[in-house]
Amino acid sequence: MKSIILIGYMGAGKSTIGKALAQKRQIPFLDTDIWIEERQGKKIAEIFADEGEEYFRKLETNMLKELKEKVQTHVIATGGGLPIQAENQILLKEIGVVFYLEVKKETILIRLNGDKSRPLLLGEEKEQKIERMLKIRHPIYQQFADFCISTDEKNVESVVEEIEKILENHTDFRR
Ligand code: S3P
């Protein structure tokens, strides 16, 4: 069976929703950022600071190639920038069905208030940074995903339910 892949901007709830969905489906959960951190022995913020973003993006692509070969039927939460690269998009579609968890700027600001772990949102003008990135990324996420789900003002359980309903109608995932 294929994997269930969650994409979307930072703060969309990919990891939290992914864990809950994996538990409900009784399949393992994998978070691409955590996979990279464990392999590198460093936090994402340290990788960005020491080696730079380009290096991190290469790690993401290499990880996907490895996942494609080795990993079977997981719920996979991806880093927010991972599905932006065309090469990664091809790999993701080979690995599983893709859900875009959509989130508004206002919700992101609340959810990531005080967060220091996302290097792309550190420093001044956080709101403008989010706005600029969302403008570029939202259409890419939307076009690439098999299904889009808005997560604003919804709790984890209701988003999991929405995903479950879609999967029930999907021949590869019906239980
Ligand atoms: C990034 C999102 C982060 C992490 C890195 C870059 C991005 O993951 O991969 O900081 O480019 O949007 P989350 O989406 O899990 O925060």
Image (cartoon, rainbow, N blue to C red):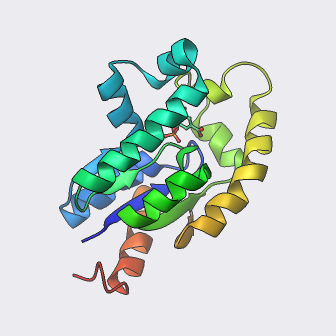
Residue furthest to the left: 26
**Location of residue 111 by image quarter:** top right
**Relative image position of residue 19 (x, y in whole percent):** 31, 51
Examine the rendered structure and indicate whether residue 41 appears above or below residue 152.
above
Ligand 1 found in image quarter: top right
**Relative image position of residue 116 (x, y in whole percent):** 56, 21
Q: In this view, does 118 lie to the left or right of 37?
A: right
Q: Residue at x 54, y 53 (%)?
A: 87
Q: Nearer the viewer, residue 153 or 145?
A: 145
**Location of residue 22 by image quarter:** bottom left
- Quadrant of the frame with the C terminus: bottom left
Q: Which residue is drawn at 73% across and 39% down?
A: 130
Q: Nearer the viewer, residue 107 or 116?
A: 116
- Quadrant of the frame with the N terminus: bottom left
Q: Can residue 118 be seen in this view?
A: no
Q: Nearer the viewer, residue 78 or 107?
A: 78
How many numbered dots are placed on residues in this image? 0
Q: Residue at x 23, y 66 (%)?
A: 25
Q: In this view, does 75 lie to the left or right of 23?
A: right
**Relative image position of residue 99 (x, y in whole percent):** 49, 65
Residue furthest to the top: 50
Q: Residue at x 55, y 50 (%)?
A: 12
Q: Can residue 22 be seen in this view?
A: yes
**Relative image position of residue 124 (x, y in whole percent):** 78, 20
Q: Which of 9 and 112 is in front in this view?
A: 9
